[in-house]
Image (spheres, coloured by chain):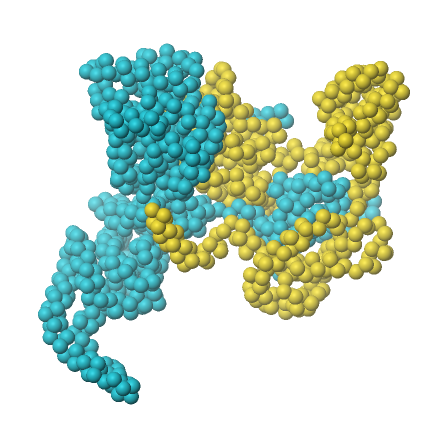
Chain colours: A cyan, B yellow
């Protein structure tokens, strides 16, 4: 069946049921692409299990980070509710003023992450506070009627969940029939609470026994800014009239700032709310935690290369602040890596490496030998070993296993030392190596960090640290290094501890030193006339220059030098390690193309320099201009660039036909010129309507046979 | 709390400062300009290559370009009385000059000029990048400030060219050989090798959007025929002029889910679809949308619904976009629902199907279409009604040289119709006009004095043709 029609725009294709594909087709897709290797199944499974681990890890992180916020909210809700419960004086006085308890939840601009937060919130609320939670979105509520409909629909649905499913039909029917109004909502609430009160001991309510007898009704406005003010105002005013019958609590999700409440609601309305402010965790902290838990750990075998990480971080910082998108990018990295790198089958946990290495086929061994990092490694070996590595598969496998083990150890050490270095650099003025550990990580991945200027200047600054800072930093470093399981850092820890004791010893000596240093100072105070003062100051300076370093300074130098030596030993960039291609994903260009595409640039390139795409010699031009043999649309585009706001179609057509005729060599004789003209005319029409489709021009009524240009400045 | 916010913004500002370069490379619009600009500058430079020396004194091509237009010498105006303004002629001349210059460049091996000019150009281009931005802004306002547009008055009518209708256009283009067919085939083969990857990524929860110059219809069609034969799928021609989200949703509920019944609103329908897909995990649907950015689908509400549809885990969406501003349709919320993976698929295929529906720009064929519809409608009317319309058309043609002709006032028209014995009361005339209006044959508007004016919204040439045809019939 064709999908071209002049009467229909949608076409459904349904194959006969028996022919439908089986369910494990995802693995199938993975397989059919890379027929060069037989391990695709295993690779796909590894990829999926890795992604699932990472996914659950990120969810866990999110949950932990939101815990504080959710706890606060829950306590707020139970407080607001207890008033209603006990019918205290406080409540009555509030009732007099008709104030609705409201939580303003400031979530930040990363709108895409809010969904998860709200989902977590409503889960927590339903578990702890109340079964009656309604989530409202602005797009569902263009008017107060829709809002009430939505609200009641959701509330009654949660009623269904609590009750047995048998009633579903009748409730469903009644929901459609009930007039959506506040009184009906209240009568519903009364009936529900009465029912639960009467049957509290029954088995059905076991799960919700945590709820109080008359649980509050929580209404969450997910995106408060996008609601129309009228709807919000009406809802608040109406529900405040009924607040003594219905324990309503509002939660506003706010992306910008709490000020928006007052901008959206006039004083008369906002005075009906009793607002408490809650602040969610900033998305940058969230990202730092994610990076810390996903990348700076040896838990996952898969690693990101420097450029890739940079792309992901940049998308985060300059486009959306969305942690979800960051994780999506990470997922894409994993998929790309396992899809495009046949050797990624070895990108697994340390325990599995041995088995997988020994089941490698000959072809896979060959592809190991082809890895650039492995070739570099081979070149460094002595000649006998070189031959063995290049010819003997089993020897190669042994070596590969060893190298992969080394890589794992390298990464573990790398993370520890990176954290130590970060302790130092994060407190330096102006942060030459960046404030966040992710910046430091990028810098270390990019090239040898100790060869950079920034590192040099941060060492300089570190040499000027005061003692208390230095001691606390050393203590932190000791803690970090102690937490590692291996014995790698035993010596380093010892050394650092030694430094610490030396610093303590210094303190004792310091008191003596102070006496000595006082004397010139005293002299200085005695002299009062200018000449002598200058003289003594000069002397003082002289002596200071020649003076030997104090013990503290010497020790400080020693400490910094030691840290430097650790950095040089452990923080070598990953791409210097053999076989790093197996574990590190480096396709930054692919990633950027898929996540952060520039469709306009692509169009522009295609129109401006078609030879970029069509590899034909005739299209290549030296001047950067366009050949007259280029595709029609390119020529038409080029000609239109030379025009102003309006373009005369006739002139345009004429210019086009001149260019095209020139390209087609003057072989056409006069007789057939009319025919040719028609073809050119048709080609012109096609090109122009294509430009219109692309949005470069539009028809204009200002002048007959003119079109208006919609772009400016050659793009 | 406010303080905290400030802190955050401070940090961000710092980071942004640190990676200013990246911003320069990424900013969507700025990117186009910064990357695209040198290229176009070079080409327009070519067209003025005769005046390269002059150029070197000037700072920017574009400003120069405009200046030339503005100061265009009058001789053209005097010699060519056909033109109302000199500028477009100047432009044409330039274009032709360019052609000849390009030709001579290609034919003669001597490339002294090309060899000598590039270095200063490049350095200049770099040096004046900032200035160019400034100039760009100035140019923009310069071009858009004056209400008068300087283009020639020539119209397609004077060209005495045979009008092309849709059919002949198609035939002509079918016969014209496609340039660079081999290269285009190569390009398409590269894209086709990605098919299985697309499938994989669709199954992993991403949706795929294709962009780039050239029709992506054939590519998607090939994807469909080669990989989707054994699964339920829906093809949506976004470029179809009367496609709506409703019809897409309807075809899902009616044909895919075999549901009989109607829905109150698209949101209800969406909810139903969501529910069905969540209940039945074996249900899967591939949705292919050609031109997701078409006129009919680019609205906010349509995009919202499509985005929500695409976010269902068992609905796999693969779509193509063509418009340069298409990405502006989506805000962050929609983008995260769509969960796009972008693929550049520049195919250079002509947009045959996509442009076959639109007739607004092709004056050549829009006339014939309007004419045929005019004839059709009028043939079904009474003789008197035809007379009434004819009267109006004649009157409009008489006044065709008056650009501020507001239309025929109702009273005058009534008088004329009475005199021609076409109507006997203004009620019958009104009834007749209502019928015309329903068929979009006439347009009425109220003038400043409250009088109703009648106008036929068809261009003069079509009207003339129509009258001729009518005469023949009579």
Camera sees residue A649: yes
Residue lying at 33% horizontally and 20% vertically, measured from the top left? A245
Pick the front one: A642 or B217: A642
Camera sees residue A565: no
In screen coordinates, is A547 left or right of B126? left
In screen coordinates, is B335 left or right of B186? left
> x, y percentage for residue A263?
45, 39
Pick the front one: A594 or A433: A433
Pick the front one: A116 or B188: A116
Residue lying at 13% horizontally and 77% vertically, measured from the top left? A515
Q: Quadrant of the rendered structure where residue A495 is? A: bottom left
From the image, which quarter does the C terminus of chain B lie in?
A: top right
> x, y percentage for residue B132?
59, 60
Residue lying at 84% horizontally and 15% vertically, measured from the top left? B424
> x, y percentage for residue A98?
35, 27
Image position of A247 with respect to B329: above or below: above
> x, y percentage for residue A275?
34, 35
Residue lying at 65% horizontally and 48% vertically, measured from the top left? A637
């Amino acid at each position: 069946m064709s999908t071209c029609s002049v009467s229909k725009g949608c076409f459904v294709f349904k194959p006969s049921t028996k022919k439908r594909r089986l369910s494990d087709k995802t693995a199938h897709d993975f397989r059919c692409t890379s027929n060069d290797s037989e391990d695709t199944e295993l690779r796909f499974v590894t990829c999926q299990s890795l992604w699932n681990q990472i996914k659950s890890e990120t969810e866990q992180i999110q949950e932990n980070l939101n815990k504080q916020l959710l706890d606060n909210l829950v306590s707020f809700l139970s407080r607001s509710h207890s008033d209603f419960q006990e019918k205290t004086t406080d409540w009555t006085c509030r009732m007099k003023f008709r104030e609705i308890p409201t939580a303003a939840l400031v979530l930040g601009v990363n709108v895409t992450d809010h969904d998860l937060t709200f989902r977590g919130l409503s889960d927590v609320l339903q578990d702890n506070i109340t079964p009656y939670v309604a989530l409202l979105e602005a797009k569902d509520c263009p008017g107060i009627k829709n809002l009430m409909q939505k609200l009641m629909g959701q509330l009654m649905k949660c009623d269904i969940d609590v009750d047995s499913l048998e009633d579903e039909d009748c409730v469903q029917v009644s929901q459609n029939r009930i007039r959506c109004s506040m009184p009906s909502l209240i009568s519903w609430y009364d009936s529900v609470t009465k029912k639960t009160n009467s049957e509290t001991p029954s088995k059905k309510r076991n799960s919700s026994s945590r709820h109080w007898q008359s649980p509050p009704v929580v209404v969450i406005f997910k995106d408060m800014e996008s609601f129309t003010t009228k709807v919000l105002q009406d809802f608040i005013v109406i529900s405040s009239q009924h607040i003594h019958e219905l324990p309503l609590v509002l939660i506003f999700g706010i992306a910008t700032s709490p000020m928006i409440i007052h901008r959206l609601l006039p004083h008369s309305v906002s005075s009906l709310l009793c607002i408490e402010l809650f602040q969610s965790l900033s998305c940058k902290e969230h990202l730092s935690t994610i990076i810390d838990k996903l990348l700076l750990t040896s838990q996952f075998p898969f690693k990101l290369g420097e450029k890739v990480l940079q792309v992901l971080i940049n998308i985060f910082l300059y486009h959306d602040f969305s942690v979800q998108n960051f994780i999506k990018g990470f997922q894409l990295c994993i998929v790309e890596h396992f899809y495009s790198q046949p050797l990624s089958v070895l990108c697994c946990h340390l325990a599995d490496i041995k088995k997988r290495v020994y089941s490698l086929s000959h072809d896979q061994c060959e592809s190991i030998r082809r890895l650039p990092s492995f070739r570099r490694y081979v070149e460094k070996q002595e000649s006998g070993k070189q031959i063995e590595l290049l010819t003997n598969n089993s020897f190669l496998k042994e070596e590969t296993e060893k190298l992969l083990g080394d890589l794992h150890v390298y990464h573990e050490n790398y993370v520890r030392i990176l954290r130590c270095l970060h302790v130092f650099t994060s407190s330096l003025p102006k942060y030459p190596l960046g404030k966040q550990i992710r910046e430091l990580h990028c810098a270390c991945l990019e090239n040898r960090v100790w060869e950079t200027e920034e590192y040099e200047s941060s060492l300089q600054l570190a040499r000027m640290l005061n003692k208390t800072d230095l001691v606390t930093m050393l203590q932190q470093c000791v803690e970090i290094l102690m937490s590692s399981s291996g014995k790698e850092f035993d010596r380093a820890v010892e050394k650092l501890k030694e430094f610490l004791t030396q610093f303590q010893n210094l303190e004792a000596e310091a008191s003596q030193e102070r006496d000595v240093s006082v004397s010139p100072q005293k002299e200085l105070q005695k002299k009062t006339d200018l000449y002598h003062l200058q003289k003594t100051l000069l002397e003082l300076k002289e002596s200071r220059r020649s003076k030997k370093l104090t013990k503290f300074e010497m020790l400080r130098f020693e400490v910094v030098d030691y840290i430097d030596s650790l950095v040089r030993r452990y923080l070598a960039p990953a791409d210097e390690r053999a076989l790093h291609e197996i574990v590190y994903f480096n396709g930054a260009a692919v990633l950027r193309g898929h996540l952060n595409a520039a469709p306009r640039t692509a169009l522009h390139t295609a129109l401006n320099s078609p030879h970029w795409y069509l590899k034909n010699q005739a299209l290549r031009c030296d001047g950067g201009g366009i050949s007259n043999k280029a595709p029609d649309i390119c020529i038409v585009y080029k000609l239109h660039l030379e025009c102003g706001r309006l373009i005369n179609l006739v002139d345009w057509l004429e210019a086009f036909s001149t260019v095209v005729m020139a390209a087609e060599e003057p072989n056409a004789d006069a007789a057939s010129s009319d025919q040719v003209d028609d073809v050119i005319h048709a080609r012109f029409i096609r090109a122009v309507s294509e430009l219109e489709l692309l949005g470069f021009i539009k028809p204009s009524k200002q002048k007959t046979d003119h079109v208006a240009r919609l772009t400016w400045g050659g793009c | 709390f406010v303080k905290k916010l400030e802190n955050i913004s401070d940090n961000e500002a710092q980071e942004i400062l640190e990676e200013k370069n990246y911003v320069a490379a990424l900013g969507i619009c700025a990117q186009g300009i910064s990357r695209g600009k040198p290229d176009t500058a070079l080409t327009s430079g070519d067209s003025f290559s005769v005046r390269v020396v002059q150029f070197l004194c000037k700072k920017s091509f574009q400003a120069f370009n405009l200046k030339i237009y503005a100061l265009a010498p009058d001789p053209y105006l005097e010699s060519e009385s056909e033109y109302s303004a000199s500028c477009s002629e100047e432009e044409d001349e330039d274009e032709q000059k360019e052609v000849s210059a390009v030709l001579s460049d290609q034919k003669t091996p001597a490339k002294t000029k090309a060899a000598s000019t590039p270095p200063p150009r490049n350095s200049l281009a770099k040096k004046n990048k900032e200035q160019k931005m400034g100039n760009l802004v100035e140019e923009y306002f310069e071009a858009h400030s004056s209400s008068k547009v300087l283009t020639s008055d020539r119209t397609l009518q004077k060209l005495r060219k045979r009008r092309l209708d849709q059919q002949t256009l198609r035939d002509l283009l079918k016969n014209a050989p496609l340039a660079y067919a081999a290269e285009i085939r190569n390009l398409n083969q590269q894209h086709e090798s990605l098919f299985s990857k697309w499938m994989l990524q669709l199954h992993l929860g991403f949706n795929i959007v294709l962009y780039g110059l050239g029709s992506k219809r054939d590519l998607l069609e090939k994807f469909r025929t080669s990989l989707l034969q054994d699964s339920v799928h829906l093809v949506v021609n976004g470029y179809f002029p009367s496609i709506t989200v409703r019809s897409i949703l309807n075809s899902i509920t009616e044909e895919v889910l075999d549901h009989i019944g109607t829905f109150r609103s698209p949101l209800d329908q969406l909810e139903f679809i969501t529910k069905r897909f969540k209940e039945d995990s074996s249900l899967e649907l591939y949705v292919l949308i050609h031109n997701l950015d078409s006129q009919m689908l680019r609205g906010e509400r349509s995009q919202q619904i499509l985005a929500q549809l695409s976010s269902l885990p068992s609905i796999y969406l693969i779509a193509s976009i063509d418009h340069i501003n298409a990405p502006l349709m989506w805000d962050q919320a929609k983008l995260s629902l769509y969960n796009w993976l972008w693929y550049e698929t520049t195919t250079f295929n002509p947009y045959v199907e996509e442009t076959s529906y639109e007739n607004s720009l092709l004056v050549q064929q829009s006339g014939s279409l309007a004419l045929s519809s005019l004839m059709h409608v009028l043939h079904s009317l009474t003789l008197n009604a035809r007379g009434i319309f004819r009267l109006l058309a004649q009157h409009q043609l008489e006044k065709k040289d008056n650009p501020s002709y507001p239309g025929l006032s109702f009273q005058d028209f009534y008088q004329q119709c009475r005199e021609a014995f076409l109507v006997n009361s203004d009620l019958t005339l009104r009834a007749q006009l209502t019928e015309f209006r329903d068929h979009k044959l006439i347009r009425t508007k109220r003038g400043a004095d409250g009088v109703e004016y009648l106008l036929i919204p068809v261009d003069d040439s079509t009207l003339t043709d129509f009258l001729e045809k009518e005469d023949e019939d009579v």
